[in-house]
Amino acid sequence: MAEITITKKLSELQEMIDKVKRVFYSSTVNPDYATLATLDVELPILEDSFNYDSGAVSISSVKLTTGQKWAGYVTAGDSDISMQVASIAGSISDMFLNKKGTAFTATAASPTLGGLAFSGQGYSTETKKVTGSLLMASEDGTKLFGLPNVEMYANYVQPSGTPGYFNVQIQPKPDTDGADIVFIDAATPPTT
């Protein structure tokens, strides 16, 4: 009896994205990852807060009264993608919130509290849609995956006893080729 041939062995399939270590944002939708040279910001993500679940499909069957299954159909699941961004720096607050009023800056005549003068900016907590793309790097740095076209919505959270953060919900959209996720492998740059 002939031995069954396995064309792809486990050793050839040992490619995984371990843990998401770094998350980058670009305001550019549908970037060309082959020539990507600039990202707007590396987002300060709370440890273990990045979650990506593309959504489980729902499978339904058409059954006859006899119990026979004649047909099946699927419905795509809803994605659950989220992260917690731990910064209220101006560029992060400006990204996720709408500015309101005029920024104020401390001057020599400003009142102080504890010897410090303060500057600031007001924001509305109404929902703001942020569009762009995300690029995530694995913990070991050898794998990347991109979400080329996303809509993000955030709310600010200040829990008792812990630092505040933006709780960000992410909705992926297909890029111009129809892809809503892109897996990218590390390689040594070619030499000429």
Image (spheres, rainbow, N blue to C red):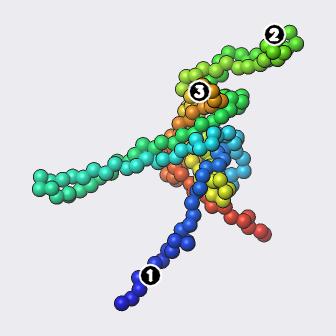
Q: Secondary structure at mark 3?
A: loop
Q: Which residue is mark 3?
A: 159
Question: What amino acid type is highlighted by mark number 3?
Answer: Pro
Question: What amino acid type is highlighted by mark number 1?
Answer: Thr
Residue at the front extreme of this rendering: 161
Q: Residue at x 20, y 58 (%)?
A: 70
Number of other residues with Cα within 10 Å of mark 2, as a class: few under 14, some 14 to 19, many 20 or more: few
Horizontal side of 92 relative to 148 (left or right) equals right
Q: Give the mark toward the camera: 1 or 3.
A: 3
Give coordinates of residue 122: x percent, y percent. Answer: 67, 18
In which quadrant is the C terminus drawn? bottom right
Question: What amino acid type is highlighted by mark number 2?
Answer: Pro
Give me the C-alpha separation between circle 3 and circle 2: 29 Å
Say above or below: 126 vs 39: above
Q: Nearer the viewer, residue 36 or 187?
A: 187
Give me the C-alpha separation between circle 2 and circle 1: 79 Å
Number of other residues with Cα within 10 Å of mark 3, as a class: few under 14, some 14 to 19, many 20 or more: few
Q: Earlier in the sequence, mark 1 or mark 3?
A: 1
Give coordinates of residue 137: x percent, y percent. Answer: 64, 52
Q: Which residue is mark 2?
A: 111
Q: Which mark is residue 5?
A: 1
Q: Secondary structure at mark 1?
A: loop
Q: Which mark is residue 189?
A: none
Residue at the right extreme of this rendering: 108
Q: Residue at x 29, y 52 (%)?
A: 73
Q: Secondary structure at mark 2?
A: loop
Number of other residues with Cα within 10 Å of mark 1, as a class: few under 14, some 14 to 19, many 20 or more: few
Q: Earlier in the sequence, mark 2 or mark 1?
A: 1
Give coordinates of residue 163: x percent, y percent. Answer: 65, 30
Give me the C-alpha separation between circle 1 and circle 3: 57 Å
Residue 51 visible in this rendered orientation of the protein: yes
* Circles 3 and 2 in contact, beta carbons < 8 Å: no
